[in-house]
Amino acid sequence: MIVKPIISPKDAAGRIKEGESLMVGGFMGCGSPNTIIFALKEIGTKNLTLITNDTAIHDLNTGTITGVAHLIQIKLFKKIIASHIGSNQETQRQMLAGETEVELVPQGTLAEQVRAGGAGLGGFLTPTGVGTEVANGKQIILVAHRPFLLELPLKADVAIIKAKKADKAGNLVFNGTARNFNPLMATAAALVIAEVEEIVEIGEIDPNDVHTPSIFVDYLVKAEQPEL
Amino acid sequence: MIVKPIISPKDAAGRIKEGESLMVGGFMGCGSPNTIIFALKEIGTKNLTLITNDTAIHDLNTGTITGVAHLIQIKLFKKIIASHIGSNQETQRQMLAGETEVELVPQGTLAEQVRAGGAGLGGFLTPTGVGTEVANGKQIILVAHRPFLLELPLKADVAIIKAKKADKAGNLVFNGTARNFNPLMATAAALVIAEVEEIVEIGEIDPNDVHTPSIFVDYLVKAEQPEL
Amino acid sequence: MEYIANKEIIAKRIAGIFKTGEVVNLGIGLPTLVVKYIPRDVNIVLQSENGIMGLGPAPAKGSEDRDIIDAGGAPGSIKNGGCFFDSAVSFGIIRGGHVDYTVLGVLEVDQEGNLANFMVPGKMVPGMGGAMDLTTGTRVVIAATLHFQKSGVSRMKRRCTLPLTALREVNKVVTDLGVFEVLGDRFHLAECFSPYTPAWIQAHTDADIIVKNDCRMVTIDVQPNGKTQ
Amino acid sequence: MEYIANKEIIAKRIAGIFKTGEVVNLGIGLPTLVVKYIPRDVNIVLQSENGIMGLGPAPAKGSEDRDIIDAGGAPGSIKNGGCFFDSAVSFGIIRGGHVDYTVLGVLEVDQEGNLANFMVPGKMVPGMGGAMDLTTGTRVVIAATLHFQKSGVSRMKRRCTLPLTALREVNKVVTDLGVFEVLGDRFHLAECFSPYTPAWIQAHTDADIIVKNDCRMVTIDVQPNGKTQ
């Protein structure tokens, strides 16, 4: 297998260009690529579109901020696609003030959209959201007399994800609930950068235990700050 | 977690009732639940609908037969849904003679149909098959000016699958290319019976390495004949 | 009769619904209280939509694993025999009907089985997270809510006024006044928690409540602060 | 000029196309011959649709693992750093455009890029297996075929007569006579294998073949039996 370049956090963040769409793995900060997020915060690349499950934590009272919320705070995003922003008051504030466009998507639909983007599907039919605002402007298709929403795939220019372990070829293994959207996003972006806690030799990961095949990963970054 | 009953091959096969739809895991006999297949052959339950990737091997010249081909030989199926029957001359013979209805489905579409059945989707849009006989009678939907076929989910009354290892709760781990359709079928049938080579205590499988969560598995059968 | 809000009653009553082997997803907030009332001899499997089957109890302070959280972001643990999976698999499990019960908090729930819990336009937009998939895909949807808002208005409505999380998916509502089944566009009172009476509940709820013939008067033995009497 | 069918030439020429790091799926039959001609210094990743990334060489007799086969059902192996996955993931990889090249055998291929290889109505119905997904999803589709059927009729057509495997997906055809690119509803001869000539190929193929300005005469040094001269 081919060895994947291990690059610096700054180099990784620098590959995200102004105006691009960016997928960021993680669920409430768990499994969030914090090292790359921190480097991107330093660079401050703007006008990005963020695709992520949730916008982590930003408590305007206590000042607590985690994960991707650091990037929302400095307004790197013109648009945010997420399923949940309930723990990030700043995202809600930007949304209600009209400063940032926020599209709320049911979590299962978002996961499936990312998967569909990676898997070459033109879309899928889900019962989720029928009869709600989520259905607005979407095609409804009846299958066996039951209504489904036609949801379209999501892809991105870049995905930054976080894994527990990689081998040098880029095979990834996730740990616990830090898996979440990470393996899905690895399939759906033109450029995939994986932040990992540990890099082992090729052959050290059992081929039955690989969560993300190496071919999806372009670059590896060694995690420097598990907490952010 | 709940301990799943370990039943005899005969008991397992007896739970498949005349006229039901049956998913059978395996790819060219690899990862095929041969112990249960053999028991079902003894019982001879008829008028089943078979959903399987391929009909394994039946060479009419040499007499070689593997996996699910044993059941096709004794004509248990009124209908077969599969992607490939090229190594089973008897299936082709039955199809061409009009003895058994055979529906040929692209392999990626079949895999996705089974997944969609298990995942509660109403269907999905695939580019595969556009402009071919596979498109006959199917709805074509344009997404970003590109045509896709609307394919519908597949479910079954029973799935018999084969894993390398189970814990007593029914968590499954597959080995090598014996994985194939097995984990997908585990999600898409009302009754799921897993034939396994090894049964270990609950807790002996790393929760990150489980391929099929225990909740999908109703019964376990100890594999008695890895080859058939 | 004076109303004293009591989340613990709701949690305890819901905890009595499940049977061993059933797969349950508990939403953020009130529903998480349910865990502490699950009888010791009932062995349910908690699914959490962030990718875990067999969610265990919250870890002791200092022994948290930052790679294991529950869907609310709180530190979590996994039971022996549990497993982890990605978000697409997780929602395949949910949407595919493999979860028996979901328990969700609500802003409003109405007699048609509609539920609103993801936003108050112009004011609060937490987002739906997994709630839309959970209400749509799960076999039985239980709305868990204090019967009244702080203003004294019932959260049980004839028709929700807030944006819906799901259409006609709620099967059961458990409040601190009783257990209601949703059938034929009406709430059917199946259990009335003493000291409240069916008549009092009907009088204080702006929705059609049919008292079932076999409606039972039930005493649930917890204080608002979670202590048993 | 006498035509001597030579599958080895096809395999050797195709093997020269790939670069290190590219992901390649080789179909059953003729395409599997390609493996033996991959140059030692080119490190490609073989994907097999039955759920393997990094397919290795066929194991020695007696050391087969019955849980590892290739897509044709033959015993297989996995390279260091490879991995296994289920069929939905496998076709997600294929359909999603993550495979760079697929090499497929054909019954017919036509100048519009159509390909037929899964059935002869009323006679032979092997089924499409993964071929429809592979031709549709892969970045570059290479049809690998002896130029002529046993009857002497060319497999390269103006228009396929058999049921299609895919519509307009073939990018390149490699036969034992040459390399053809499919562009603008014509075959474009890019390489002509000696001793054949462009004129001879045109005369013996019932399809429109444009000889590219930079068409090269190429000698590929293998015998029909696979031995190098």
Image: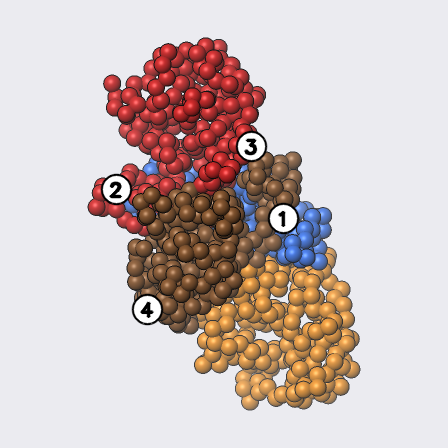
Chain colours: A blue, B brown, C orange, D red
Quickly name the residue at label 4: B201
Q: Nearer the viewer, residue C223 or D159?
A: D159
State whether residue B45 is above or below residue D225. Answer: below
For discs 2 and 1, the disc positioned in front in the rendered view = 2
Residue type, numbered disc 2 = Pro
> To which chain does the residue with label 2 belong?
D
- The residue to which callout 3 is attached is D167
Residue A151 numbered tag? 1
Q: CA distance from mark 2 to mark 3?
A: 36 Å
Q: CA distance from mark 1 to mark 3?
A: 26 Å
Could you say where residue B217 lies in the image, as x and y percent from the top left? Answer: 44, 65
Give the CA distance from mark 4 to mark 3. 51 Å
Callout 1 secondary element? strand
Q: Residue at x 65, y 74 (%)?
A: C173
Question: How many other residues sit within 10 Å of disc 4, few (<14), some (14-19) or many (≥20)?
Answer: few
What mark, if any, has residue B161 been given in the picture? Answer: none
- Chain under callout 3: D
| Image location (x, y in percent) of residue A201 | 29, 44
Which is more toward the observer, B90 or A69? B90
Residue beneath disc 2? D59
Q: Quadrant of the C terminus of chain B?
A: bottom left
Chain under callout 1: A
Same subunit under labels 1 and 4?
no
| Amino acid type shown at disc 4 | Glu
